[in-house]
Amino acid sequence: MPIPNTPEDPVAHPAALLREMVRIRCVEEELADLYRDEQEMRTPVHFSVGQEAAAVGVCAALRASDLVYTGHRSHAAYLAKGGDLTGMVAELYGKETGCSNGRGGSVHLTDRAVGFAGSAAILGEMISVATGAAWALAKRGSSRVVVTFFGDGASEEGVFHESLNFAAVHRVPVLYVCENNAYSISSPLSARQPANSANTGITERARAYGIAAERLDGNDVALVHEAARRATAHCRAGLGPYLLELDTYRWREHVGPGFDTGIDRPEPEVEQWLERCPVRRGTAALRAQEPDAAEPDAGELVARWDEQFRDETRLAVAAAKAAPYPTADRLTDGAYGRPAVAS
């Protein structure tokens, strides 16, 4: 029986979904070029270019109070959840004004004001953290949902199985989102999982624990958004966890600003996925829905947004470069408790 969404659950317009994907694409492309050319960002970077529909479709279905955790490929979810761009860029430059005060870099973003609870570089770490956070919220009687994004490689870690088992037993309101881009660094899925993956794949593993799970086209933002609305409604209704396996593909190398076409991944495969670009597909879908000729063409809108968001990114970069580095006297802030004040 379908679970009805409440009026609080967001329903994003196709134009809003496309706009957010364009923003993330522009931000990451600008940052990738600067990272390569200037060598001033002293942090590893894992870009989500090509995978924007996953983060945008899911986060657009969340309430402001819901929490999001991610792994190392964190920029898209951070921005889609409403994270501060200036703070993110300053973090990549290691500045005090960064969202983690310049101490975490690209893989340790946080913006608690908008419910982006954190990201981490340890493979699969945030799967368990998100599960625990969701359990704690549920025990307090909260209707909030916790989402954790991770890649297909993280699904092969023991913590994935431990977390799903715990969440199923305790009916934890956590949404597991696997961005399946078919690679763990340079190892394809076929080299890491059994040939009969129709019975042992990621979605099937979740179902084996009694968890509701779906596998779908992760480059169709409208499809992802509707699935995320079903999943969050399921969690809020007290029916336990949910897993979405989103088939997608990163355009750039695993870590860094470059491309690994013909090195780690075959060129025909990459070309096939470039044709399935989520931004291009979102543009075509919006154009098909336009009511009359008086409205701006979807392509025209994308061109305007492209210029706007590249300018926005350049301003954030300028602010980051002008900001101070953390000072030595604050080196331990956030790592140790401050001494108690004498009475």
Image: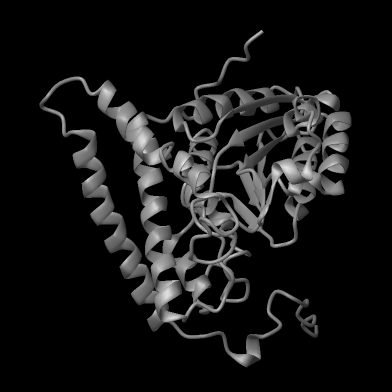
Q: Nearer the viewer, residue 313 or 198?
A: 198
Quadrant where the N terminus lies? top right
Mark yes or no: residue 51 visible: no
Image coords of residue 256 (percent x, y): 54, 66
Residue at 52% from the left image edge and 71% from the top image edge: 91
Residue at position x 62%, y 11% in the image: 2
| Figure check: 142 above or below 29 | above
Left or right: residue 63 versus residue 244 is left
**Residue sitting farthest toward the left:** 294
Residue at 36 percent across and 38 percent down: it is 18
The residue at the far top in this view is 1
**Percent of width and height locating residue 117:** 64, 54
Q: Quadrant of the C terminus?
A: bottom right
Task: Judge from the rendering whether residue 205 lies leftward or rightward of residue 331; answer left or right.
Answer: right
Q: Nearer the viewer, residue 30 or 57?
A: 30
* Residue drawn where x is 87% and y is 47% of the image: 158
Q: Quadrant of residue 253?
A: bottom right
> Which residue is at the front of the view, 70 or 287?
287
Percent position of residue 100, x then y: 59, 69
